[in-house]
Amino acid sequence: MVESMSWREMASPIGPLVLLATDQGLCHIDFGGYASREEPLRKWAAARGIALAPAWQEDPEHPVIREAAAQLERYFAGELTAFNVQLDMRGTPFQLRVWEALLDVPYGEVCSYKHIAEAIGQPKAVRAVGGANNRNPLPLIVPCHRVIGASGDMVGYGGGLNIKTYLLQHERTDKKG
């Protein structure tokens, strides 16, 4: 059976986002427009066993994509603090544990890589947690932007530190309001 992939590009306050979904759930969010991100997205999908064309289609009405886009719009409007869209996370068992732990980081708060390493029961795996955080395929929904360095410094983010700063300020402002 060939697994299909649907996608949609949506506008957001941090620029265009591309949402990808299988029939099992939302599996990837990428920063940027589809035209500039198509090749890396196809490589990402192929590496995870998801079929390419012709089973790769734009489908803004795919139920998971439609729900994810609606929830992201509500998040950016300050109306949503927790996502509940169906997810299809694909990674190693270690990555999945890290990403699940990220889902427990409260809206408007931050934690360190060490905190996540401790949360998954591997306190010495701080660097590996950083690597898994860096490979998070669902930024925003799996809130890797809420992870900062142990010193409290901003550290890398796939969308860039300016977007990470925006997201943290958005959540803190919204939480106060």
Image (spheres, rainbow, N blue to C red):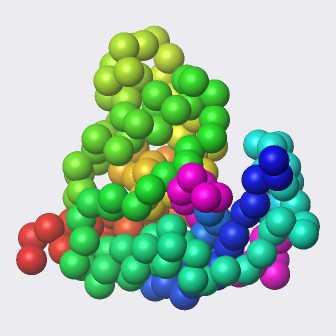
Q: Quadrant of the C terminus?
A: bottom left
Question: What are the residue bounds of the magenta stretch?
Answer: 22-40
Residue located at (32% from left, 28% from top): 115
In the rendered view, does 118 fall on the left or right side of 98?
left
As drawn, 86 above or below 132: below
Residue 8 or residue 124, whichever sits in front: 8
Residue depicted at x 46% and y 85%: 13
In the shown orientation, is residue 6 left or right of residue 145? right
Which residue corresponds to the image point at 63% horizontal and 28% vertical from the top-left?
92
Can residue 159 be spotted in the picture? yes
Vertical placement of residue 165 versus 117, above or below = below
In the image, 58 versus 161, the foreground residue is 58
* Residue 77 position within the rendered picture, expressed as x and y whole percent measured from the top left: 29, 84
Residue 131 in view in this figure? no
> Looking at the picture, how far across and down is residue 145, in whole percent?
43, 54
Q: Position of residue 6 (x, y in %)?
A: 69, 70
